[in-house]
């Protein structure tokens, strides 16, 4: 078959389009450390019909139903937390979940990773058309905006009370010197 240049030009255009899509998707996924939703991929220009191709090709990793990760992005220690934060998004694409309790204390570096499900608080009107993942324990409660922090791409409840409580506060009879000598400061 003679080279007319048409097919070659087509692939060049497709390659340029693909690079544009890939850059747009990487930009959208940057705040969540490379994780993104199928909707974000569509917004970047990827048709739904090519999502499975990109997973099979190794460009994307499937993290959960409708949630993917760009394969070239470095791993993050909070990857699982980012997945569930993305899972908690409303129809407008805004994350609704805020990590609270012992999970929040772990994220803030105040304790070791707690066993069992991750604790996430969502607004009282939160609804999903699927089951809550076993790894999550949802609490429906309002959290004041001033008590929410963004850390490593996820929202964390960080009120003043989440700070470690020194032993002197628990036992006021102990002096500050006793607390320091015991290494509890």
Image (cartoon, grey):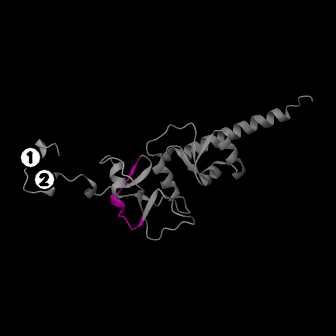
CA separation in Å, label 2 and label 1: 8 Å
* Residue with the mark numbered 2: 168
- Mark 1, secondary structure of its residue: helix
The residue positioned 47% from the left and 61% from the top of the image is: 96
Disc sitting over residue 149 in the figure:
none
Q: Is residue 2 above or below residue 182?
A: above
The residue positioned 51% from the left and 44% from the top of the image is: 30
| Disc nearer the start of the sequence (2/1) | 2
Q: Visible in this render: residue 44?
A: yes
Q: Visible in this render: residue 185?
A: no
Judge by depth and name the residue closer to the eye, 127 or 167.
Answer: 167
Tag 2 and tag 1, C-beta contact below 8 Å? yes
Judge by depth and name the residue closer to the eye, 40 or 50.
Answer: 50
- Mark 2, secondary structure of its residue: helix
Q: Residue furthest top?
A: 2
Residue 51 locus on image (x, y percent): 67, 48
Q: Is residue 183 above or below residue 128?
A: above
Residue 152 vs residue 133: left or right? left
Indicate the quadrant containing the C terminus: top left, top right, bottom left or bottom right. Answer: top left
- Residue 146 shown in magenta: yes
Q: Which residues are magenta?
A: 139-151
Residue 85 locus on image (x, y percent): 48, 55
* Residue with the mark numbered 1: 178
Indicate the quadrant containing the N terminus: top left, top right, bottom left or bottom right. Answer: top right
């Amino acid at each position: 078959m003679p080279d007319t240049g048409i097919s070659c030009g087509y692939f060049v255009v497709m390659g340029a389009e693909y690079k544009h899509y890939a850059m747009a998707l990487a930009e959208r996924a940057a705040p969540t450390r490379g994780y993104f939703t199928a909707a974000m991929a569509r917004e970047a220009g990827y048709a739904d019909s090519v999502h499975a191709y990109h997973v099979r090709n190794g460009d994307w990793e499937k993290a959960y139903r409708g949630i993917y990760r760009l394969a070239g992005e470095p791993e993050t220690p909070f990857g699982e937390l980012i997945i569930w934060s993305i899972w908690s998004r409303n129809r407008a694409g805004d994350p609704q979940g805020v990590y609270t309790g012992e999970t929040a204390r772990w994220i803030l570096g105040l304790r070791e990773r707690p066993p069992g499900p991750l604790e996430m608080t969502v607004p009282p009107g939160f609804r999903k058309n699927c089951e809550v993942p076993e790894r999550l324990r949802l609490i429906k409660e309002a959290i004041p905006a001033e008590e929410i922090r963004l850390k490593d791409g996820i929202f964390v409840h960080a009120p003043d009370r989440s700070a470690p409580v020194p032993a002197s506060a628990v036992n006021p009879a102990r002096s500050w010197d006793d607390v320091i000598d015991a290494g509890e400061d």
